[in-house]
Amino acid sequence: MSPIKAPRGTKDTFSPEINSWQLIERISSEVLELANYKEIRTPIFEHSELYTKSLGQVTDVVQKEMYSFQDRSERNLTLRPEGTAGVIRSFIEHKLYVNPLPYRVWYCGPMFRYERPQAGRQRQFHQLGLECIGILDPRIDAEIINLALNVLENLKIPNLSLEINSLGSSETRTYYKEALYNYFNNYISDLDTESQMRLQNNPLRLLDSKDTKIKALLEEAPSLLDFLDNDSQIHFNLVCQYLNSLSIRYTINPLLVRGLDYYNKTTFEIKSSSLGSQDTLCGGGRYDGLIQSLGGPELPAIGWAMGIERLLLSIPTNNQNIANLDCYIITLGEKAKILAFSILNQLRNSNLKVDISFYDSNIQKQIRRANQLNATTCIIIGDEEIQKEIVVLKWLKIQKQEEVSLNKLDNVAYKILSS
Ligand code: HAM
């Protein structure tokens, strides 16, 4: 019988990669909590309707990528493909809008999309995200972009670039879609079936097409920025000014529409040129109409999410913070095992990272094991040491050893920690 494997597009995570996860979690929570964002944890599955209503019926996520199922009571449920919809559902359900706004939250956890797996793209992936609800002020747009960059810079991720755009109001997009439709309709026979479908259903999706013919046609296509309504234009100019005031460098990319339908006004993406084809680390923008469309009050909101798997691919390995073992305890004989077991406990209580040998092999073999574990020191206890009421403390990297009296074991912890 062949052994069972993890499902395609999912992954087990081991040490030392887990150190990078912990680093990401620590740094991001520090940066975001300093900016007064609080952590939120929402369910991993929600009613399917939440996503079909919020992400857009004709988006790839809703049409092709959702992990949807019926539970035993025939409820239609979906494993969350992203975090925003769940946060907004919870904000409305718990009437959190009665509290002073903005409501600022961050989250980190697994998301699920049925996509073709490749480097930086999985079916179970993880996002770090934030949402800021209730304030339509361009300072908030600049604040959240700045926070995303702060997280990435603190993780020492190289070669970052920021692209921003404005999608304007829903009227902007209605007029622009019409103009785009008319333009591409002139070339309908040059388009493949997928592009023709996009043209019919949502011409904006042609803007981020990978098809070379579409890319060439886009050079002459009408620009979204020429269709912006006055209010959106003013908002976008101010966002740019606030970014300038923070000395944040950006490129305005009028083709940046994002893959989910809830956006309006500001959208942005942060990429790293050190990644391959899946180079978008972070994406986000305003979604001022979503709360009301899900049955809540009319309140603006904005947020972003970054893919942790893509962060892991870009974090420099020397930033991985690998903690080694401080001490490995080696025993010879049954009496030594009993004494060593209490020393193990004592040293761990003194904040040392300690492990113990479970092998009865000779000392040399056990020392080899200590070296494999990259331990700084080992403690050796045999019958002779018990008789003399001492242990041998051996420094593995510098090949030095000393005898330590059993009643001076606290010194061992001090010596190792201060070495
Ligand atoms: P998104 O662009 O769909 O936006 O995803 C955000 C980020 O999640 C992407 O830039 C990428 O780094 C990562 N990501 C997406 N799909 C995968 C995958 N299959 N494997 C690995 N990483 C992936 C959102 O999800 C919005 N909810 C962001 C947002 C929050 N907008 C406003 N608030």
Image (cartoon, rainbow, N blue to C red):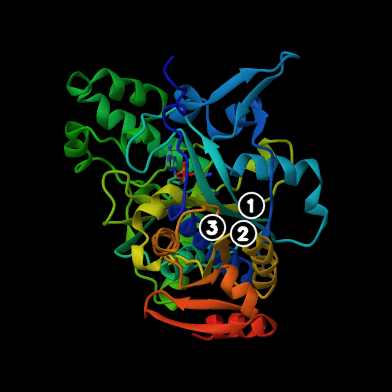
The residue that label 1 is drawn on is 300
Residue type pointed to by label 2: Leu
Q: For the residue labelled by badge 2, is the local secondary structure a helix, a strand or a loop?
A: loop
Q: Position of residue 95 (x, y in %)?
A: 81, 47
Residue toward you, 54 or 23: 23
Residue toward you, 396 or 164: 396
Residue toward you, 239 or 276: 276
How many angstroms separate mark 2 from mark 1 (CA)? 6 Å
Mark found first going from the N terminus, 2 or 1: 2
Mark found first going from the N terminus, 3 or 2: 2
C-beta proximity under 8 Å, tags 1 and 3: no
Q: Which mark is residue 136?
A: 2
The residue positioned 50% from the left and 63% from the top of the image is 23
Q: Does residue 170 appear left or right of residue 49 in this picture? A: left
C-beta proximity under 8 Å, tags 2 and 1: yes
Based on the displayed image, in which of its 4 quarters is residue 373 positioned? bottom left
How many angstroms separate mark 3 from mark 2 (CA)? 61 Å
Residue toward you, 339 or 120: 339
The yes-or-no answer for disc 2 within 8 Å of ligand 1 is no
Q: Position of residue 403 (x, y in %)?
A: 54, 83
The residue that label 3 is drawn on is 357
